[in-house]
């Protein structure tokens, strides 16, 4: 990796891409790139002296990139379409081009790594693992799929002796192992954990069985005598040459929570491990789903050799990830939570957690479906999960990388949602609609650009007060 002086990113604003961009920028490579949309994240990258443009235009590529081809590494995300003119330019001119996952595999292969996979929950668990191990000085790098509130970044680095080919080999690299496009097959972890395995990404996998096979291949790449940790709901074949463990929320597995108590949305638990019970842990983030995530992270830390007091302190001081059960307003009059949930199972878990926190309050949800294909594949499941709401505002589908599919729109979900208080609306109409509603608990839900509403909703509430 030291061969390349210039690193060019196609899709630099993606959450996974931006972490790698920050890494290369830290080790003093010349980093630049393209993204379709200017966001808060890309603004932060620009503030870190990374040059970004927002129009797909070969003329926007700097002369340094064009005249130093042999010193340039181009990194792209699967979200970049093959018709992208810059992508075509780099291919036609024989630049070295790698997928994001391939680069992460190269970065991480020089040291032991921890890889967290799962169709949901992996961002929270990987960020929590990173926080616990970082506080123990046991992390050389963590590439995360969300912005950690503790560090305001999706990248953690221990900078001493840092280079592109030798990240301190006495510490762990922590990787969020994404199943999309089989990204996680580029990783060979010492510790592998799977949080969940639901049907998703059928545009890639076609069948649930193919997803299972992909996850089995991922854990089979765990180092010999390494550790595989599975949520007890994940039913896949375990490798024969690894140490295999299970965890759960409260079932009797190798790691689980006991004596779960709730106080104002936050939980206190005792943590059962294979050798001891860690008592009276006050989980730092709200929601029952995060108790299970905390058990998962504690299991990883335990098997990584982290001491019990460090584990307890890490669980208690963890502040969460932006857009994961992210409480924006918590007043006596209104609760507002923003969440990235975009799969029916994620929405179901989110709404169940919220209902347990606020059992007597009316829950209003604003949901933006993500991808035409996912909407088509899970229309019934989305409707079932969203029917847990008392009041629904359903937005248009956020297309991301996809072209429209005939007959697929938010209305096919809307028609199946089994509640009386529901409306289809444009994102631009949300603020005015909310002004006429008596809001007790409000949720914004989705993985598209629904997050652009968060500040507007918060300001609207403040102004109404």
Image (cartoon, helix red, strand yellow):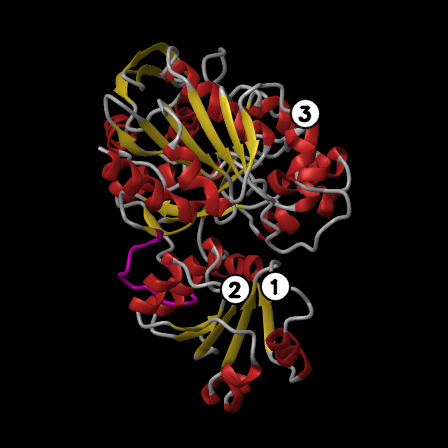
Q: Is residue 446 left or right of residue 124?
A: right
Q: Is residue 162 magenta?
A: yes
Task: State the image coordinates of residue 86 (x, y, percent, origin top left).
Answer: 60, 77
Label 1 environment density (alpha carbons within 10 Å; few <14, some 14–19, many ≥20): some
Name the magenta segment's main secondary structure: loop
Does label 1 or label 3 sit earlier along the sequence?
1
Task: State the image coordinates of residue 238 (x, y, percent, origin top left).
Answer: 64, 30
Q: Would you name the residue on which mark 1 appears?
A: 80
Q: Label 1 to label 3, Cα distance in Å? A: 33 Å
Is 179 above or below relative to 256? below
Q: Is residue 199 visible?
A: no
Label 2 environment density (alpha carbons within 10 Å; few <14, some 14–19, many ≥20): many
Q: Would you name the residue on which mark 3 appears?
A: 416
Does label 1 or label 2 sit earlier along the sequence?
2
Q: Is residue 446 left or right of residue 455?
A: right
Q: Secondary structure at mark 3?
A: loop
Q: Which mark is residue 11?
A: 2
Task: State the image coordinates of residue 398 (x, y, percent, origin top left).
Answer: 58, 48
Q: Which residues are magenta?
A: 154-167
């Amino acid at each position: 990796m030291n061969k390349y002086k210039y690193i060019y990113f196609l899709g630099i604003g993606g959450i996974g891409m931006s972490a790698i961009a920050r890494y290369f920028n830290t080790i003093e490579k010349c980093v630049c790139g393209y993204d379709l949309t200017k966001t808060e994240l890309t603004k932060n990258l620009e503030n870190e002296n990374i040059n970004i443009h927002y129009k797909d235009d070969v003329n926007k590529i700097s002369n340094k990139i064009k005249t130093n081809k042999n010193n340039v590494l181009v990194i792209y995300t699967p979200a970049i379409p093959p018709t992208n003119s810059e992508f075509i330019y780099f291919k036609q001119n024989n630049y070295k081009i790698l997928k994001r996952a391939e680069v992460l595999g190269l970065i991480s292969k020089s040291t032991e790594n921890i890889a967290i996979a799962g169709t949901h929950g992996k961002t929270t668990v990987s960020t929590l693992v990173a926080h616990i191990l970082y506080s123990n000085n046991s992390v050389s790098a963590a590439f995360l799929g969300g912005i950690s509130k503790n560090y305001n970044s999706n990248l953690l680095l221990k900078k001493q002796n840092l280079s592109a080919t030798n990240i301190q080999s006495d510490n762990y690299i922590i990787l969020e192992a994404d199943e999309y496009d089989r990204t996680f097959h580029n990783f060979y972890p010492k510790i592998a954990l799977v949080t969940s395995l639901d049907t998703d990404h059928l545009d890639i996998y076609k069948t649930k069985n193919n997803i299972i096979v992909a996850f089995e291949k991922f854990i089979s790449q765990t180092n010999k005598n390494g550790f595989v940790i599975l949520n007890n709901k994940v039913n896949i074949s375990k490798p024969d040459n690894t140490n295999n463990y299970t965890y759960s929320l409260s079932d009797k597995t190798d790691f689980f929570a006991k004596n779960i108590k709730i106080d104002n949305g936050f939980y206190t638990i005792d943590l059962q491990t294979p050798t001891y019970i860690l008592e009276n842990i006050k989980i730092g983030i709200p929601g029952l789903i995060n108790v299970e995530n905390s058990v998962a992270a504690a299991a990883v830390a335990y098997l990584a050799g982290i001491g019990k007091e460090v584990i307890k302190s890490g669980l208690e001081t963890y502040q969460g990830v932006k857009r994961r059960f992210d409480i924006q307003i918590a007043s006596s009059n209104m609760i507002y939570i923003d969440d990235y949930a975009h799969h029916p199972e994620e929405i179901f878990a989110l709404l169940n957690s919220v209902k347990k926190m606020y059992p007597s309050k009316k829950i209003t949800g604003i949901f933006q479906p993500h991808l035409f294909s996912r909407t088509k594949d899970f229309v019934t499941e989305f409707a079932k999960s969203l029917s847990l709401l008392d009041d629904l505002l359903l937005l248009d589908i956020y297309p991301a990388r996809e072209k429209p599919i005939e007959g697929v729109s938010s209305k096919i979900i809307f028609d199946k949602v089994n509640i009386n208080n529901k409306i289809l609306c444009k994102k631009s109409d949300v603020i005015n609609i909310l002004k006429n509603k008596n809001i007790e608990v409000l949720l914004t839900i989705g993985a598209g650009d629904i997050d652009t509403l968060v500040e507007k909703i918060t300001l609207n509430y403040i102004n109404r007060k």
